Image (tube, rainbow, N blue to C red):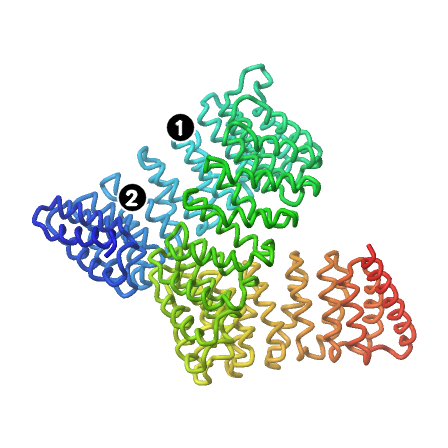
Amino acid sequence: MDSSQKYLNKLLEEIKKSDPLTRANAIGQIGGLKDKIPINMRRGILMELLKFSGEKDQMVRLSSVLALGMLKEVIPNDLLELVVKRLLELSEDIEWSIRGHSAVALGGLEHNIPYALRVKVVMRIFKLTRDDNYEVRGFASIAMGKLKNIIPRSMRTRVVKELLDVSKEKDLKIPVIDSLTNLIEVISGDKKKEVVERLMKLTCDDVWISAAAYETLENISNRIPAGIRHEVAEDVLELTGEKDENIKIAAIDALGNLNVIIPKDLQKQIVDRLIVLIENSDSGGKLNPVEIRVSAIRAIGNSDAIIPHNIKKDVIVKLLNLTYEKNWKIRSYSAASLGLLESGIENADKVTHRLLNLMDDEDWHVKSAAVQSAENMGSIIPEYKRKAVIKKILKLTYDYDLNVKIPATVALGKLKKIIPRSVKGKIIRRMLDIAPEDGLDVRGSAVWAIGELCEAIPKNMRREVIENLLKQGEEGGWETGRPVAEALGKLKDIIPHFMGRDVIESLLKLSRDSEWGVRINAAWSLGELKLIIPKDMNRMVLNQLLALCEDHVSGVRSRAVLSIGKLDTIIPTDMNKEIIERTLLLSEDFDWIVRRPAANALGKLKDIIPKDMEKTVVKRIYELGNDREWGVKERAIISIGLLEFIIPDDLMKKTVVKLLRLTEDPNDTIKLASIRAFKRIGERIPEDEGKPVIEQLLKLSFDLNWVIRRSCALAIGELKNIPENLKTDATKRMLVLCNDKDWSVRDAAARALGSMNTVIPKSTAGEVINKLLSLIEDINPSVRDSAYRSIIRLKGVIPKTMKGEVDAALKLHDSKEKELTHGHGTV
């Protein structure tokens, strides 16, 4: 029995004692154990807590509520309803502390709250925002923000109005600010404007409230309505002249983080202001305090997108000069900002040289910042300097200070693309040699780096690397087991086949670790290693993944079902039904991060779906197309395309109608997925739906987004039942898209024409061939190739009068391409 089990048993004895204080203390400590409580004991402990939550003693009741809140991640699904109902009862307790903490616990449950109780929970929390006790109102305000995704649409305006009113209470301003940050995603444009205006007023409040309001404005910057962005930016800019240093710093930081919404006509003005603030003294000769200068340097680093190109070089020079200052903060933040402005660095040689020197600085903050800056620069580091940079960072992995050693180790993993071949072996050797005495964090970073450096591992070191990881993986646990479990999946292409059994056995063991972070990575890696799983272990792996599909942590269930979808070709026939049933069940999970991969897996597992379950699967995918989360909806649409041949005829018409509706979705990701689904199911579209489908695709081919135009072109090329009266329109539109400014759209249109052999009317055949002939001279090689292939595919469409011209053009194209290929081959 390990120490944590002994400790838990001791606490379970103490909750039976008569003294209320002893019981309350033990209950609180049980809550603090969270997922360290063994799975087989969780149900019993939760039932005990529910019982104690009804005791007369206030301390015991309060401790029980707090513990239920802390154990939110380990509540079995079939106990959720019982827990939520009890918390709702406790939210009406006579004691304000119990009401308040019940609200917090309900807010923490978020998606875990059963659907049938969601409206009741939201209504109750809403009522608590009007509680007589101001602390309860504060707790309820925080909870309301956490419940953003389950607040009924009809209630959102009322909720925001209530929170805006509560934000006028002195002691509740900060909790409400936190809540409004969460709610901004789900409220209407008008209410967003009210929220932003209220936050702007709060920036003029006392120091702490002002700082919190500015931080929130930064966090919600890209959701600030376009109509008030200019006003917000101007107000923040004005506040950089405030006398109060805290307000001034908050405003400067806000400018850096609001860069995505700053109007073009204000960009230079803001950058000029920041440049003044980084100087030792302002234009009036008054000294700028170090903290003000640091904030301005940090803001400049975050403002890459708004710094006018003609002054970017001067900004880089100023930052380089600041790295010579005596104050370590100025040196450190200036070094960090240099890396963030890498897109504007023209003299990469000079910057790299300075960063190399800063890696020898006496202060660890500066060394660490220089390493991270070099990491951000990556491929713009001059080739002849790369070896020096990598060797210097490698040297810093021996630094005595963990704050340098860890960033250096991580940087080597991130700079994998620029590591010279001559240094690769030394880096891998260093990662392997990092010993237990270097600290768990360093070892974890080294293991992560090994996973990233997969392609850099010399062939003669591969076995040693895998053996090293397997040995470290024996320890398990968050610090070591987690990165090992992930690294093994990343190294799938270099694991020697004879080591497959050892690797899979290690991952199976790690997938049973008490730490969810280890289980989640092991579940993912098992899906990545399909090609090295020994045949006699297929069933063992799948059974373990099925077990992980019942894990109490959503992320583990998510990775497990994702991996099952990847292992489609190794599933034994007698497991088909069980796996499809489990995947269907997970597609109804309360958490969208589980429903999404489940929807994806149902499409990937198309070849193992039992005949008598095909209709059930299709219906479920159809329902998931209505999911409230766009990520789930997108995967369901993709799976519709994958399941094209098992969708029954009676459901295909409904499916097409649904996809047509989804092409109007405001989210471009959903729109794209729907268009691409039409490309896949082109041959299955019912005849009477051909007209609305082609009309919609033609309409969407005018979209401003090039990705949508491209996808429409490809989809139109796959449609086989275009009505006669629309064939000319479809062909003419493809001809227009052949002139698109984006090469990928021209490429798609050229490819589509090649697929439209039976669609192209005779009257436009000459125009089509002429257009394709012009495209084989296109500046883009992919467009040239697609046009060439399409002409060959359309040989039956070429007018007789053009055959000689076409043959000559194709012959000339062949000779030119040979010349280009020969030229590239001899460079």
Mark 2–mark 1 contact, CB under 8 Å? no
Classed neighbour count for the residue bearing mark 2: other residues with Cα under 10 Å, few (<14), some (14–19), many (≥20): many
Say which quarter of the image contains residue 168.
Answer: top left
Q: Could you tell me which residue is drawn at 38 percent across and 63 percent down?
A: 509
Q: Could you tell me which residue is drawn at 28 percent across and 42 percent down?
A: 137
Can the viewer see residue 725 in this picture? yes
Q: Amino acid at mark 2?
A: Phe
Quadrant showing the N terminus? bottom left
Q: Is residue 525 left or right of residue 381?
A: left
Residue 744, position in %: x, y? 71, 60
Circle 1 sits on which residue? 207
Can the viewer see residue 261 in this picture? no
Quadrant showing the C terminus? bottom right
Q: Amino acid at mark 1?
A: Val
Q: Could you tell me which residue is drawn at 80 percent across and 75 percent down?
A: 792
Q: Residue furthest bottom?
A: 612
Q: Could you tell me which residue is drawn at 48 percent across and 66 percent down?
A: 527
* Number of the label disc, if any, that sits on residue 139: 2
Give how far apart the Cα atoms at labels 2 and 1 are: 22 Å
Residue 798, position in %: x, y? 84, 77
Classed neighbour count for the residue bearing mark 1: other residues with Cα under 10 Å, few (<14), some (14–19), many (≥20): some
Residue 531, position in %: x, y? 53, 70
Which of 357/64 is in front? 357
Lower sequence index among marks 2 and 1: 2
Q: Is residue 57 left or right of residue 104?
A: left
